[in-house]
Image (cartoon, grey):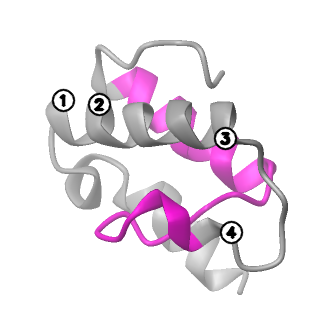
Amino acid sequence: MFNKEIKTIENAREFIQFLIKKDLMFHLDDDVDNILWDQEIDKKTIKLLHLRHQEIWTVGNPWEYAEDIIDVFLEGL
């Protein structure tokens, strides 16, 4: 999933769900580095996460197109 370019809103929604499942979700307005609190993530993965993070904003505002996913995630905290 890290290697899959995000070209559509549906791709972005799938990527956000992937982040949640892998316990890598972070505040989408913040830098990807904010997911590194208690985890060791290799530099290649971080580089890909930065790229995918930029892409989710390119297809639209994730706070609008993924609000349902994000709400479910936040309720589980």
- Three-letter code for the amino acid on which mark 4 is drawn: Leu
Residue appearing at x 37%, y 51% in the figure: 66
The tag earlier along the polypeptide, 2 or 4, is: 4
What x and y, as percent, mark residue 44?
65, 31
Q: Nearer the viewer, residue 20 or 34?
A: 34
Residue appearing at x 54%, y 72% in the figure: 34
Residue that carries the numbered disc 4 in the rendered image: 36
Which one is in front in this view, the residue at disc 2 or the one at disc 4?
A: 4
The tag earlier along the polypeptide, 4 or 3, is: 4
Which one is in front in this view, the residue at disc 2 or the one at disc 3?
A: 3
What x and y, as percent, mark residue 11?
43, 22
Main SS of residues in magenta: helix
Q: In whole angstroms, how far apart are the C-alphas of marks 4 and 3?
A: 11 Å
Q: In whole angstroms, how far apart are the C-alphas of marks 2 and 3?
A: 19 Å
Label 1: few (<14), some (14–19) or many (≥20) C-alpha neighbours in 10 Å: some
- Three-letter code for the amino acid on which mark 3 is drawn: Lys
Residue that carries the numbered disc 1 in the rendered image: 59
Residue appearing at x 21%, y 42% in the figure: 57
Residue that carries the numbered disc 2 in the rendered image: 55
Quarter location, residue 29: bottom left
Figure check: 53 above or below 8 = below
* Quarter that holds the N terminus: top right
Q: Residue 43: which numbered mark, if any?
A: 3
The tag earlier along the polypeptide, 2 or 3, is: 3
| Residue extent of the magenta highlight | 10-34
What x and y, as percent, mark residue 55?
29, 31
The tag earlier along the polypeptide, 1 or 4, is: 4
Quarter location, residue 38: bottom right
Q: Nearer the viewer, residue 51 or 29?
A: 51
